[in-house]
């Protein structure tokens, strides 16, 4: 049942603002709505929507500018939309004049941030999504057109296009196969031939070997995430056959950026390594092969050093963490194949890396790790896992750390063997 008219009514939006200002809990909200004569289904729809309001205000608006503004969405549409920091950054890739087709427009997450000078048309096969799109663009004072059409049948509709292929068939259902997109990347490539240029938003882990030559590949995220793989086509691909990794700050400005020429030899695993990865689930201990990067690393293997560092996720996804590490410390190396922990004699800088000073290391055995913690007076630990599977909370309880100091404990691999590395976070540079 569609409750869009109810949710967009002045009466319900006023009630929602009042409920927020008075900090009414769920029972109070439900009781108030029942007294006003709303049915169980209507109350459920209103309360589900209320839960989304602070989320989309945080995602799309500054705290103050978002207060009192309402958009139309459901949970799935909100989850799939581009947030304000990435949206603002991507807006700078567009020309200042021309027409744009927002294909698979959804609730309008990409159109929200397009330059005002561009004429935009939203396309979607889902009537509910188009209703969201029209309402949201109007609510933000944007003039757009809409068409209910299969985006694969849209030809020569504009100068440029943007597309976010569907990755989930149902709400709450994750598509485990990253290549299971609608439309497929092959279809997106065909679509791109009808435009001067455009961009496609792919999952960060999408197989890079399947992305066509002549495009530009961008991995976008913040300090601690990689949120999308953006593929630029035609006139928008200012650096064709280049891979870039960009860390974006909260305001949508570039915090750090790296690039390399595309090398297809790093995008396809050799047959022996691929076979090992395919058999991982049936292997144990040092026989298992672990990969957290999406491509091969050209960093050598070596011993545990003075520091261990975690590359930013955009660097791992883009296969640029090795280049960034060696630029800071020529001695940088991995301690285990396929695990993106970089060992070095010098701390590697933020925001490219989160660096930790190594205090000690021991085999992963309860007695050995307890002794290491006791020797350094560690009573509070944060446990980081990579290449080792266990329940972090249960392991911390089992270790029973006692002491006044705090530390970060890595459970990982060194030359394939399980190892515990005790560290302290290096201080971040002052802004």
Image (tube, grey):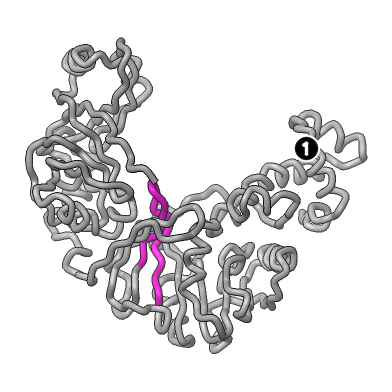
Q: Residue furthest front?
A: 430
Work out whether 172 lies above or below 168.
Answer: above
Quadrant for the N terminus in the image = bottom right
Q: Which residues are magenta?
A: 218-232
Tell which of 167 and 32 is nearer to you: 32
Would residue 127 be visible to someone looking at this image? no
How far across and down, in percent of the image, does residue 386 sit?
26, 37
Residue at image x 28%, y 72%? 242
Residue at image x 9%, y 48%? 331
Would residue 292 be visible to someone looking at this image? yes
How far across and down, in percent of the image, does residue 75 sit?
62, 50
Element type where label 1 sits in the image: helix
How far across and down, in percent of the image, does residue 164 sit?
50, 66
Work out whether 246 lies above or below 368.
Answer: below
Residue marked by disc 1? 21
Residue at image x 33%, y 40%? 428
Residue 218 located left or right of residue 355: right
* Residue 43 part of the magenta-drawn span: no
Quadrant housing residue 127: bottom right
Residue 23 located left or right of residue 369: right
Residue at image x 58%, y 74%? 115
């Amino acid at each position: 049942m569609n409750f869009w008219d109810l949710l967009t009514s002045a009466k319900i939006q006023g009630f929602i603002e009042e409920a927020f200002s008075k900090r009414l809990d769920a029972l109070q909200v439900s009781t108030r709505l029942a007294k006003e004569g709303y049915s169980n289904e209507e109350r459920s729809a209103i309360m589900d929507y209320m839960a989304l309001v602070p989320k989309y205000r945080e995602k799309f608006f500054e705290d103050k500018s978002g207060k009192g503004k309402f958009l139309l969405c459901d949970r799935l549409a909100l989850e799939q939309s581009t947030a304000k920091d990435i949206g603002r950054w991507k807006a700078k890739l567009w020309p200042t004049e021309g027409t744009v087709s927002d294909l698979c427009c959804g609730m309008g997450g990409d159109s929200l941030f397009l330059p005002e000078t561009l004429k935009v048309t939203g396309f979607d096969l889902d009537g509910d999504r188009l209703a969201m799109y029209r309402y949201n663009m109007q609510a933000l004072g944007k003039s757009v057109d809409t068409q209910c059409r299969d985006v694969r049948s849209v030809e020569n509709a504009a100068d440029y296009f943007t597309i976010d292929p569907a990755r989930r068939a149902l709400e709450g259902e994750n598509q485990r196969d990253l290549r299971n997109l609608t439309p497929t990347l092959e279809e997106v490539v065909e679509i791109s031939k009808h435009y001067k240029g455009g961009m496609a938003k792919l999952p960060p882990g999408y197989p890079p070997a399947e992305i066509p030559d002549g495009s530009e590949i961008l991995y976008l995220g913040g300090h601690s995430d990689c949120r999308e793989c953006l593929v630029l086509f035609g006139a928008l691909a200012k650096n064709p056959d280049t891979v870039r990794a960009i860390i974006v700050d909260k305001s949508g400005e570039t915090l750090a950026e790296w690039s390399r020429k595309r090398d297809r030899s790093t995008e396809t695993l050799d047959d022996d390594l691929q076979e090992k990865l395919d058999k991982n689930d049936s292997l144990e201990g040092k026989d298992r092969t672990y990969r957290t990067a999406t491509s091969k690393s050209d960093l050598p293997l070596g011993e545990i050093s003075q520091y261990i560092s975690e590359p930013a996720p955009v660097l791992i996804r883009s296969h640029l963490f090795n280049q960034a590490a060696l630029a800071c410390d020529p001695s940088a190396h991995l301690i285990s194949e396929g695990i993106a922990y970089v060992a070095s004699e010098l701390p590697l800088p933020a925001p490219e890396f989160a660096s930790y000073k190594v205090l000690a290391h021991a085999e992963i055995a309860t007695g050995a790790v307890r002794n290491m913690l006791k020797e350094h007076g560690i009573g509070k630990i944060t446990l980081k896992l990579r290449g080792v599977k266990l329940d972090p909370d249960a392991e911390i309880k089992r270790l029973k750390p006692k002491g006044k100091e705090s530390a970060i404990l890595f459970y990982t691999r060194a030359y394939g063997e399980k190892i515990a590395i005790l560290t302290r976070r290096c201080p971040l540079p002052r802004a």
